[in-house]
Amino acid sequence: MRLHVLGSSGGYSAADNPSSGFLLEQGATRLWMDAGHSTFAALQRVADFKRLDALVLSHLHPDHCADLYAAHVALRYRVEGPLRLPLYGPPGTLEALGNLLGADGAANLGETFPFRAVNEGDTVEVGGIRLSFLRTDHPGITHAIRAESRNGTLTYSADTGPKADLAGFAQESDFLLCEATYQEGKVGAPVHLTARQAGETALRAGVRELAVTHVWPTFDPQVSLAEARSAAGGIPVRWAQPGEVFFFSQAED
Ligand SMILES: [Zn+2]
Ligand SMILES: [Zn+2]
C-alpha cells in the first residue's frame, strides 16, 4: 500500500503545506482521504482526479473538507461531461457543505458525490480496501479511519483529543498516521494530541511505523518528531511532510 501526503498542516494551510489530505493507493484502487484546503491541487500532481475510486472525509472542519468544492467544480462542470465520485463522510455532510452553494446545494453536491453516511462500527469496501471507523474525541462527528487490504493496514487518527481509544482502534496496524498538533508546553484546546501522545499511542497500539501529521503551522516539525520518538519506544517515526510517499506492507509472522 502506498500513502501520498497531499498536505498535513494542522488547522490551516501553511505557505508550503496544504491542510490535511492524503491519497491511499492499493493496487488499482485510489482513495482520497480528507480534502483540506489546497489538497485538490496537490492531488493533481500525483493522480488523475477523474480516476479516483472514492473520497472519504473524517469530519467537516474546513481544514479537512474545503477542497470538496474544488473537486465538485472539476467533476460537475467538466467540458467533456460530468463525472461522479463516491463520497463517505459523517451524517449530514451534503446538507452542511451544500449550504454554501445555495438552496439546491445539497442536491447538486449529491449528484457529483453519491454519498453514504458512515458511523462508528460501519465497514465500507472501496476496491481492495476495507474501511472502518472510530468516533474520536473532537467537536462535531469525527471519525478515525482504519484502512485494511490484503497487503497492509493503515490507521489515520483524523483529529482527536486524548479520550478516544485510538490505540485500541489502531491495534497492530502496519502504519499509524497520527495527529500531533501540539508540543510540550504549547498546548491549546484539548481536542487534539501532543506529539508525545501520538508516540505513546503508537507504542500502546503496537504499530510498526508512525507518521505524525496535523502539526500546528507555526511549530517546528522536527521538535514534534523528537517528542513523538521519545515516547514511541523505538517504533520508527516520521513526519508526514507534504509530497512524501510512504510505502508499507503487512507484517510477516
Ligand atoms: Zn484539523
Ligand atoms: Zn477538526
Image (spheres, rainbow, N blue to C red):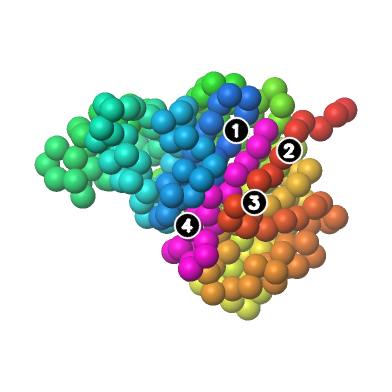
First in sequence: mark 1 vs mark 2: 1
Mark 1 is surrounded, within 10 Å at the Cα level, by few (under 14), some (14 to 19) or many (20 or more) other residues, namely some
Q: Which corner quadrant of the image does residue 161 belong to?
A: bottom right
Whether 9 is drawn above or below 142: the answer is below
At a point 27% along the width and 45% down the height, the residue shown is: 97
Do the residues under discs 4 and 2 have CB atoms within 8 angstroms? no
Q: Which residue occupies the extreme left position in the image?
A: 103
Residue tagged 4? 19
Residue tagged 2? 248
**Residue type at numbered disc 3:** Glu
Magenta portion: prevailing SS class: loop
Q: Along the horizontal axis of the image, is 148 left or right of 218?
A: right
Mark 2 is surrounded, within 10 Å at the Cα level, by few (under 14), some (14 to 19) or many (20 or more) other residues, namely some
First in sequence: mark 1 vs mark 3: 1
Q: Is residue 58 visible?
A: no
Mark 3 secondary-structure assignment: loop
Residue tagged 3? 244
Estimate the spatial distance between the alpha carbons at disc 3 and disc 2, rounded to whole Å.
13 Å
Q: Along the horizontal axis of the image, is 149 left or right of 39?
A: right
Mark 4 is surrounded, within 10 Å at the Cα level, by few (under 14), some (14 to 19) or many (20 or more) other residues, namely many
Estimate the spatial distance between the alpha carbons at disc 1 and disc 4, rounded to whole Å.
20 Å
Numbered range of the magenta stretch: 1-20
At a point 65% along the width and 37% down the height, the residue shown is: 2
Mark 2 secondary-structure assignment: loop
**Residue type at numbered disc 2:** Phe
